[in-house]
Amino acid sequence: FVLSEAMSQRLPRSPVVLASLLASLAWRGALVGILTAPLYCCFGVLYALLLLPRVLLRKLDRRAFGPTLDAADGGGMGGLLLALEAPLALLSYVLYQTTKFFVLPMMSSFEAARRGVDETWVDKLHENIEDPGRIPRLTVFAAICWAPRWNTHTNVHVLWLMDPPEGEATFEVENVRQRGFSWQVIFYDGRQQTLGSIASSPTGGEWLALTLRTAGALQLTIRPYLFDGFASATLPRVRMNGVEVTRGAPVVFKRERLGFNARLKGAYETPLHWALQWHTYVLLCCRSMVSAEAVRAIYLPVGNPETQWLYGATQQGYSLRFELPASLLEEHLVFCSVYDRASFPLLPSLQVERPSHTLPPCGEDGFWATRIVRKDGTATRPEVLPSVRVTLERPSRTALH
């Protein structure tokens, strides 16, 4: 599976490098299978054994729900149902962490073999999912392991710098200012730890600079957001120690490239994805029992530091309703994605555009994530969060606006 995807990419011509890469991917892939297969089998057996009592207790829980629920925990979860869900959630969490521990180094090994191939921003999700010459299932699997809360409002573009100077380097990002376009560039190390960020600045110069301590490969990601009816924008260039590292023709992001998000669930979702993310819904329903820091670390393993977040559990048949000041919408973009329990987009690419806004009903239990992004690209301040009220409403009790 991994080898097929690796061979479908543009790999180095050297037989030695290619053989080394394939050998590394092969033993890592085998190790993942050996360690996770028993966990996955245990999850499947336990899921089947608990299915009937879980369904019955779920119906009892729903009878206690009122017309309006707290969208943070989705109305919570009864003690008896939690007693059945907890073992599944624990197995799911261990399976997810184990898989992630081995998959991320495999991704890094593959990217290391591509040094010198990509010298500009690459829209990996769109390329790997929409290109018939690739194997999109591996891309989807890697995304669920690395950043499971799909950003359905933009495609994260990636630029790898495999050989930055050891010690310290100064990075400059072109300060692209265009109406209807907001962006942020995030710098990660090889372990996906955030090192720093640069966002568009309405008052800055032509280039925005950031000096970082460097040790090994760096991954730069850019999140371009389009709004006010604009359909495309050119991504900024990047320099390292005064030398431009984005070469070739300018990269243009287009809104139409988000269309694949609506097809992900029907085309690629499998029981493995459910097993990997089953713990998330239980965690959010019982978030009052866990520290806020732990909930965020599990729910948002790769969160954007320039963005403010709201998130919680959703219930089948309920609609998310937003109440927020009109003044907030003048300067911010408020995006919302609704996911099923496997973390696949159920209601993708939604935007809250009015002070009182009700989204379509959720067709399944799951969870939601709201991203609040400043239109000018600068960091969103956490002080905006208390002014946003989110509830779950029964559609029969509220009209969709």
Image (cartoon, rainbow, N blue to C red):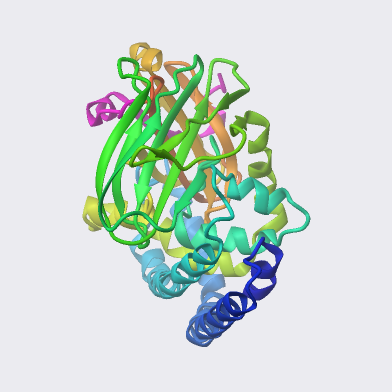
Asked whether the viewer can see residue 71, the reply is no
Measuring 66% from the left and 42% from the top, which residue is drawn there? Answer: 262
Residue 346 falls in image quadrant: top right
Residue 94 % position (x, y): 39, 74
Residue 64 in the image: above or below residue 210: below
Per the rendered image, the range of residues in magenta is 378-401
Image quadrant holding the N terminus, namely: bottom right
Q: In the depicted view, which residue is nearer to us: 333 or 45?
A: 333
Q: In the depicted view, which residue is nearer to us: 399 or 310?
A: 310
Q: Does the magenta run of residues contain 393? A: yes
Asked whether the viewer can see residue 213, the reply is yes
Measuring 46% from the left and 54% from the top, which residue is drawn there? Answer: 147
Residue 361 % position (x, y): 57, 36
Residue 77 % position (x, y): 37, 56
Q: Does the magenta run of residues contain 93? A: no
Measuring 61% from the left and 24% from the top, which residue is drawn there? Answer: 232
Residue 232 in the image: above or below residue 116: above
Residue 200 falls in image quadrant: top left
Residue 327 falls in image quadrant: top left
Residue 172 in the image: above or below residue 29: above
Find the residue positioned furthest to the front: 243
Measuring 35% from the left and 35% from the top, which residue is drawn there? Answer: 172
Residue 250 % position (x, y): 59, 32
Q: In the depicted view, which residue is nearer to us: 285 or 27?
A: 27
Q: In the depicted view, which residue is nearer to us: 387 or 372?
A: 372
Residue 183 in the image: above or below residue 3: above
